[in-house]
Image (spheres, grey):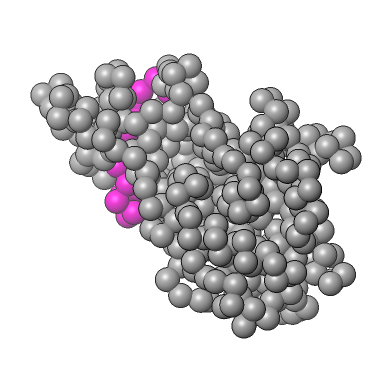
């Protein structure tokens, strides 16, 4: 059941001038962002609290969102980072034993402007054909302000994303069965990355994105984790320079998503923006070392150019089964491996959680 028929009118306008008319939910107002889509059938709360969506208006391709409600335990960060939210229909009567509230109240609490009741299939086809584009959600009359809004849309870009989401200070999370100490770089990390490490006996020290090699050395970690995060990886020049020094410490490194991209850039690789990215919990990835194919959770708009990694530095370990883009790199010149997908898998399949076990084994070996 949905209440969107009782809501105020809302509009989604894309950079190409297309207008989708729907109903408002969450907060009213106007917001500009990069319009992307995610194909997950579940995990909408994890999507809404994933810092990697900073600056983006997220469309859910699954037609009914909110049917099992929301709860504090499933948040991947302390707040929502999406700029706006698009669904076909939201459920006003969620049913689940863990439910603590509804999605409309969640959006209102976190000041997120949403639109529902539009043809999300048409929107998804538009983005797949034309590529990711900017857009605006507004509860004002879009036709009266079309030229003004188009100027805002065309001038918008996601900038300074990592500084906007990283932790301002060091925070430590202990494990009941502490065996190792891991420094987790917060480029916009998801909480379940931290939790997967804690579950494996790691004390996790979360550090700001611009932490230097000297600061890492003083923390005396057994391992280093480069997290996921938002924005164009090549924009983070200072962080990339820091990584060049950090990897020379000889401490085992594991990188995920943005961490994977930044590590590649620090080692002479290149990144490119994908036409519409990989976002959802059903992305097939081939492990080139074992020949196995895994279903993975992903959220990224940029990818490492696989052949830009020099063979003396490392080699591509995983590729996307659909478009053959680089999904993992195993480094030989330094003690590191990275993946583009999310082995912590919230929300999504648990097929690749073994990578955390391999990381722990690497620390054990060291």
Which residue is at a point 17% across and 24% down the rendered structure image? Answer: 146
Would residue 78 be seen by someone viewing this image from the given angle? yes
Image location (x, y in percent) of residue 118: 35, 23
In the picture provided, is 6 more to the left or to the right than 53?
Answer: left
In the picture provided, is 146 more to the left or to the right than 248?
Answer: left
Which residue is at a point 70% across and 42% down the rendered structure image? Answer: 309
User: Of 337 and 119, which appears nearest the observer?
Assistant: 337
Q: Is residue 220 magenta?
A: no
In the picture provided, is 256 more to the left or to the right than 25?
Answer: right
Residue closest to the far left: 144
Tally the numbered discs. Answer: 0
> Can you tell which quarter of the image residue 78 is in?
bottom left
Is 248 rendered above or below residue 317?
A: below
Q: Quadrant of the N terminus?
A: top left
In the picture provided, is 205 more to the left or to the right than 187?
Answer: right
Q: Quadrant of the C terminus?
A: bottom right
Which residue is at a point 22% across and 39% down the rendered structure image? Answer: 30
Would residue 346 be seen by someone viewing this image from the given angle? no
User: Of 92 and 90, which appears nearest the observer?
Assistant: 90
> Can you tell which quarter of the image residue 184 is in?
bottom right
Which residue is at a point 75% across and 69% down the rendered structure image? Answer: 250
Q: What are the residue bounds of the magenta stretch? A: 105-121
Image location (x, y in percent) of residue 312: 78, 48
Image location (x, y in percent) of residue 360: 79, 65
Image location (x, y in percent) of residue 23: 28, 29
């Amino acid at each position: 059941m949905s209440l969107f028929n009782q809501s105020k009118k809302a509009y989604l306008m894309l950079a190409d001038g297309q207008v989708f008319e729907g109903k408002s939910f969450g907060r009213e107002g106007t917001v500009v962002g990069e319009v992307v889509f995610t194909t997950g059938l579940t995990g909408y709360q994890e999507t809404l609290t994933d810092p990697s969506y900073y600056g983006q208006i997220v469309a859910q391709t699954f037609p009914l969102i909110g049917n099992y409600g929301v709860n504090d335990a499933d948040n991947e960060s302390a707040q929502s980072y999406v700029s706006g939210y698009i669904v076909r229909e939201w459920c006003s009567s969620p049913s689940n034993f863990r439910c603590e509230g509804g999605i409309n109240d969640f959006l209102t609490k976190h000041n997120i402007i949403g639109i529902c009741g539009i043809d999300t299939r048409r929107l998804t086809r538009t983005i797949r054909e034309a590529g990711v584009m900017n857009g605006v959600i507004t509860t004002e009359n879009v036709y009266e302000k079309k030229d003004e809004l188009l100027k805002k849309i065309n001038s918008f870009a996601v900038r300074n994303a990592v500084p906007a989401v990283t932790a301002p200070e060091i925070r430590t999370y202990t494990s009941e069965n502490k065996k190792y100490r891991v420094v987790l770089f917060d480029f916009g990390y998801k909480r379940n990355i931290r939790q997967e490490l804690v579950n494996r006996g790691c004390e996790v020290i979360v550090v700001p994105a611009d932490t230097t090699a000297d600061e890492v050395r003083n923390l005396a970690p057994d391992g280093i984790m480069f997290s996921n995060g938002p924005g164009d990886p090549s924009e983070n020049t200072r962080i990339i320079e820091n990584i060049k020094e950090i990897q020379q410490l000889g401490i085992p490194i594991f990188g995920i998503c943005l961490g994977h991209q930044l590590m590649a850039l620090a080692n002479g690789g290149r990144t490119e923006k994908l036409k519409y990215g990989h976002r959802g919990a059903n992305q097939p990835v081939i492990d080139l070392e074992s020949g196995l194919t895994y279903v993975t959770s992903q959220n990224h708009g940029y990818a490492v150019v696989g052949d830009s990694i020099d063979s003396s530095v490392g080699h591509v370990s995983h590729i996307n089964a659909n478009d053959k883009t680089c999904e993992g790199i195993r480094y030989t010149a330094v003690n590191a491996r990275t993946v583009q997908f999310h082995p912590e898998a919230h929300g999504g399949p648990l097929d690749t959680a073994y990578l955390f076990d391999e990381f722990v084994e690497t620390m054990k070996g060291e």
